[in-house]
Amino acid sequence: MSRHCLCLRKNDNNLLHILALEELDKPFYSDFRPIKQTKDEEEAFEAVKEMVKDFCKPFWDKGQAPDFQQFKAWAWKGREMR
């Protein structure tokens, strides 16, 4: 079982990436920024599900459809791991 990270990448159309922690050391992934670490891949998928629900809730509470163009900015805000 290896640890995984939910990552964002600037100037990327994908909302999130799930990477094994050891992959972050590879040069190809140097511009990926982890925002959450999980104990395994299964937990990473659950974390994505919860993150998307948290993002959507304010829209749903107003009876609106979520605007996923805002997702990356929302996800970056206060979440980048140090």
Image: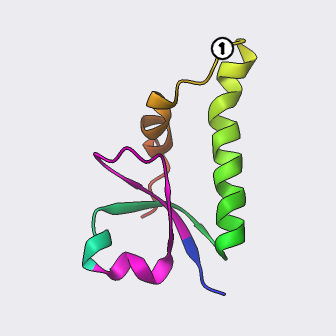
Tell me: residue 80, above or below residue 68.
below
Task: Give the percent coordinates (x, y) of residue 19.
Answer: 49, 70
Tell me: residue 68, above or below residue 60.
below
Residue type at mark 1 is Gln
Q: Residue at x 67, y 61 (%)?
A: 45
**Residue behind mark 1:** 64
Task: Give the percent coordinates (x, y) of residue 5.
Answer: 53, 68
Magenta stretch bounds: 5-26
Between residues 21 and 28, which one lies in front from this camera angle?
Answer: 28
Tell me: residue 77, above or below residue 41.
above
Disc 1 on helix, strand or loop?
A: loop
Q: Residue at x 31, y 81 (%)?
A: 26
Task: Give the percent coordinates (x, y) of residue 74.
Answer: 49, 36
Q: Residue at x 49, y 35 (%)?
A: 71
Q: Residue at x 71, y 67 (%)?
A: 43
Instruction: Give the left or right position of residue 42, taking residue 69 as reference.
Output: right
Image quarter of residue 22? bottom left
Task: Give the percent coordinates (x, y) of residue 73.
Answer: 42, 36
How packed mark 1 is, by other alpha carbons closer than 10 Å (few <14, some 14-19, many 20 or more), is few
